[in-house]
Amino acid sequence: MYALDLEVIFGRHWLFCATEAEIPEPGDFVTVEVGSTSVIIVRDDDEGVSALLNVCRHRGSRIVDDPCGAVGNFVCPYHQWTYRTDGSLIFAESSQPGFDRSAFGLRRVPVRSLAGLVFVCLSDEPPVDFDEVAGVLEPYLAPYRLAGLKVAHQTDLMEAGNWKLVMENNRECLHCDAGHPELTSAYFPFLTSNPEDITPRLRPVYEEYLGAGAKLTEAGATRGIPSGARRELDSRPTGYQVTHMPLAGKGRSFGMGGAPVSAKLIGDVHDAVFGDMSVHFQPNSWFHLLSDHAIVFRALPVAPDRTLVRTTWLVSADAVEGVDYDVDRLTEVWTATNDEDRGFVERQQRGVSDPGYLPGPYATVEFDVEAFVTWYIRRLESHFGGGRDHLGLVPQTAAR
Amino acid sequence: MYALDLEVIFGRHWLFCATEAEIPEPGDFVTVEVGSTSVIIVRDDDEGVSALLNVCRHRGSRIVDDPCGAVGNFVCPYHQWTYRTDGSLIFAESSQPGFDRSAFGLRRVPVRSLAGLVFVCLSDEPPVDFDEVAGVLEPYLAPYRLAGLKVAHQTDLMEAGNWKLVMENNRECLHCDAGHPELTSAYFPFLTSNPEDITPRLRPVYEEYLGAGAKLTEAGATRGIPSGARRELDSRPTGYQVTHMPLAGKGRSFGMGGAPVSAKLIGDVHDAVFGDMSVHFQPNSWFHLLSDHAIVFRALPVAPDRTLVRTTWLVSADAVEGVDYDVDRLTEVWTATNDEDRGFVERQQRGVSDPGYLPGPYATVEFDVEAFVTWYIRRLESHFGGGRDHLGLVPQTAAR
Amino acid sequence: MYALDLEVIFGRHWLFCATEAEIPEPGDFVTVEVGSTSVIIVRDDDEGVSALLNVCRHRGSRIVDDPCGAVGNFVCPYHQWTYRTDGSLIFAESSQPGFDRSAFGLRRVPVRSLAGLVFVCLSDEPPVDFDEVAGVLEPYLAPYRLAGLKVAHQTDLMEAGNWKLVMENNRECLHCDAGHPELTSAYFPFLTSNPEDITPRLRPVYEEYLGAGAKLTEAGATRGIPSGARRELDSRPTGYQVTHMPLAGKGRSFGMGGAPVSAKLIGDVHDAVFGDMSVHFQPNSWFHLLSDHAIVFRALPVAPDRTLVRTTWLVSADAVEGVDYDVDRLTEVWTATNDEDRGFVERQQRGVSDPGYLPGPYATVEFDVEAFVTWYIRRLESHFGGGRDHLGLVPQTAAR
């Protein structure tokens, strides 16, 4: 199943990999490892973004070892084959007579930037619906001007669990109340939009939540930013969701109790109270855009039971560390939350690997987990070219 | 073969897992890992012993991480599904309409206590001969009152060898003379009951051995404890053996030179010189009951070439550490012996993994190794429903 | 492919394993691990060299754990079965009636010494062309009297790459200019014998190289040592090559800038300026014989992506450490070179494991890499008993 996941899911869908903010200048690059595949994402000499396979066309050496850096050209360390940042080969020593350099450039990978978020697809025939999705999301994201932000911090967390458990964990907040005391100090405790489920004790808080939501919609309308949720998580190859949610407490940002974490607002957002613009992509990424910073997450499989979660915190380019923001305070809530989630994923990994495991019923608020699983199964069905008979897979819902 | 061993041998036979002495109070539990399966062995609220699969029925998380502990109820750390110590589900948040809690208790595993020794079977159809074997062994073991003893020490030793090599090593003492100087200071050097094999030089020691044996039989008869050996190692699913053997030197216990290791005798044993009541179970355990303490051993497979051996030392509940016994002195002989055996197993693992390995002939005194192998082959034959043709397996004896 | 390599390449060809200089006295031994097979190479009581499988014929334990040592007899540590250095069994305790000791000696492996270099073959039907190859090489190697040298230093370097990448790296020096600054201080920068490829700037150095080569030939002729290259790298099972190359700079040895590294010349070599007698063997060894020392290398597979490279430095038996040679200076160039090569191999391993890898064209000076690959493919073809259709393998050259 892991090989199938790498081939069908990670090999043929758009994957969020990096932000343009990580490669501001020509020659700046980051590398991304998807299974055994290494991709170089580089700022071109013409200011565009290229994605190149990190494998020399001579004898197959890795071209760059470093996770990020800056180059003039790429020079393979083994025999000095030299490539431009667009991948074209410009030097190869002792080549055979008739050798055609133009046939041996670094292989290029489809790449797109959506409002500064860089997606690549390892297939030469990427899903065609990306542009349509980008069209939907662009108005939500553009005001944050993500490409022009500054990377304030980045962490890599290895979780001892399959990537699907990492994603399922991300797609529900039923575990938040008991599991994420830091995060829930900024989040309203409402996981459902069904007013009938609100207990009398929580009714006043619910009213506050509704009021805060209405203010967000109003503020967005003033700025020309759409605020209605869009949700196509399991109905297309490039599954996504965007939701604009009010924050609790001080209502500003992801500091403890909803406190702000940077003194400089980002992009064109002029309201300090502007909630959480929350975006999900299938199969492997999620994003929180706040008035004073943005956090982007990606999960990449490393082994059947190992997943690397990269978290990047972005602040305004003119925010000064130690003056406008403090890294510890900026990252406090999500560093704790990530680590708590790692614990949940790892416990679940051990449990679902137990021959005694039986799938159980979802809770009502786990609908986005179900959407993830449905998307996943549909993508496999599509790969096998027919109904679900091929794998014998049925969504867990059917077993309820 | 490892998967087959987990399925057929460890998945369908009674496995010694723990002693009741480890879980004296309601809510006390230990966990046992058999391959990827984790079982919670817990003292019920009604003072019985339950065995539960350690997998939440909601999304499959491990319920408990700790190897032992005490609980009121079991609460899954992921979404707080809550179970009683008998496994029944009493709380599940945000459940779907019509959800039936009674259908989602923790799965129960067959469990038996034999004189305080807890056995579980991972199959719903465990071997039916356990009760018969228990009937045979109960009179030998009951006088030691194992359930009421105190755990003085417990060690886990990871051995880099297949579990079958660990068991074969346990089932012969041909290697003891050169390999276990500590153990042989308490054991008579007689591995056979064939008097013709005794050399003239050893004749006086042999006479001493026979005399000590006769005294044991006499002492047992006085107390109503049977002393005749029983041996059904390869003739039934729940293969076992019990032998009552005299000790050399001071003849008391497993201290160096047969010295006692605790000042308080255990159970109803009133003779300080009462030899070694030695018990073997297929596939994975062995026991030594002495007048002043008991040692219980279990071997569990962790990987094709990795086995975890747990050793537990039990003393009288009223023995006081530092006064009646000293942990170092109590554990000295078997800590050294275990580590020496680990070395033998690991060297053999490397050798039998060598393409140049050819099985060789057993020595005459390796009859219990042969009994183990015969039991193992018969269990596989039984699984495959016919003669040994299915696997092409023949006992090594036939090849001599 | 790894299993096939172990079976066909390492299981059926002559492998350089050690030098006689490592086992000067009767009972001296070294062990060699080829995949899971362990071989003891031991100096017999009759001064010959025996190769024995390191597996006890009783229950399969490893006989010796140490990589080298000295014994009277081999005693298995498990149950003390005892073998002479020729492998014959002389003691087995408690054996069954009728046990025939002569049938249970340690299994012997074919072994040959070529001028002090010890080769073994794990097959009972080793390639018959070894003696012919030895006849060719003996006159080149004998004057160095390798068996009588002294081991000055030995290193084991684990490289995270497949053994074939290690060998390919060894078989070309296109990477030397940029990759091995230490080594190229002693080597002339000429990888080809085609004078047309020499640039005008390098012409004077090339003339110097030709002159140094002519002097070597002359010196060899005086001593009766052949100096013409012999190259049968891909045309026979025991593929080999010998080349006598002049050194640059001081022209003496592998010290920095061609400096000598030991004050005592070795064997019958009386010219301090005697170049580098360079020998290659398929599948896994290479050798450099200098006037003042010899370096021998072997690569052995440990896993599909792991290879152990052992390097042994030999000096004159009467050279005194600290007086005639200094170990740091003796080993400086090749310790650095080995480590640099490890880096190249590991980067290439990651790259060729990338699904995005496509084989590329060789440079003109990579002809010995191609010879290695051709030899390898021919050996597999021979194994499969026919044309290359069986594996679908074609040399990369054909794809240029």
Image (tube, coloured by chain):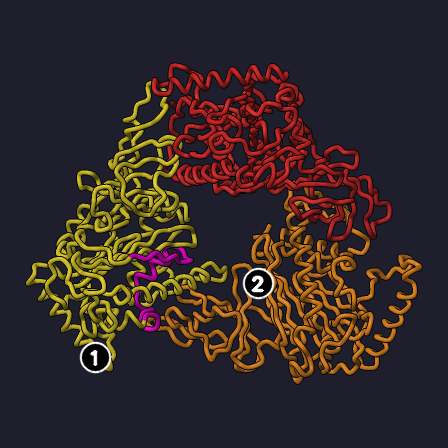
Chain colours: A red, B yellow, C orange
Q: Is residue C184 magenta?
A: no
- Figure quadrant of residue B144: bottom left
Give the spatial CA distance, label 1 vs label 2.
Answer: 50 Å
Q: Quick one: B25 or B62, which is closer to the camera?
A: B25
Q: Residue at 53% across / 16% down in the picture?
A: A215
The secondary structure type at the circle numbered 2 is loop
Going by the image, does A268 lie left or right of A351? right
Q: Is residue B9 visible?
A: no
Going by the image, does B202 lie left or right of C217? left
* Residue bearing the label numbered 1: B203
The x, y position of residue C330, in whole percent, is: 69, 74
Residue farthest right in this picture = C200
Q: Chain of mark 1?
A: B
Q: In the figure, B203 relative to A3: above or below?
A: below
Going by the image, does C147 lie left or right of C55? right
Q: Chain of mark 2?
A: C
Q: Residue at 65% across / 27% down in the picture?
A: A267
The secondary structure type at the circle numbered 1 is helix
Magenta range is B154-180
Q: Quick one: A97 or C338, which is closer to the camera?
A: C338
Give the residue type at disc 2: Ser
Q: Quick one: C295 or B372, which is closer to the camera?
A: C295
Q: Residue at 35% across / 32% down in the picture?
A: B80
* Residue bearing the label numbered 2: C123
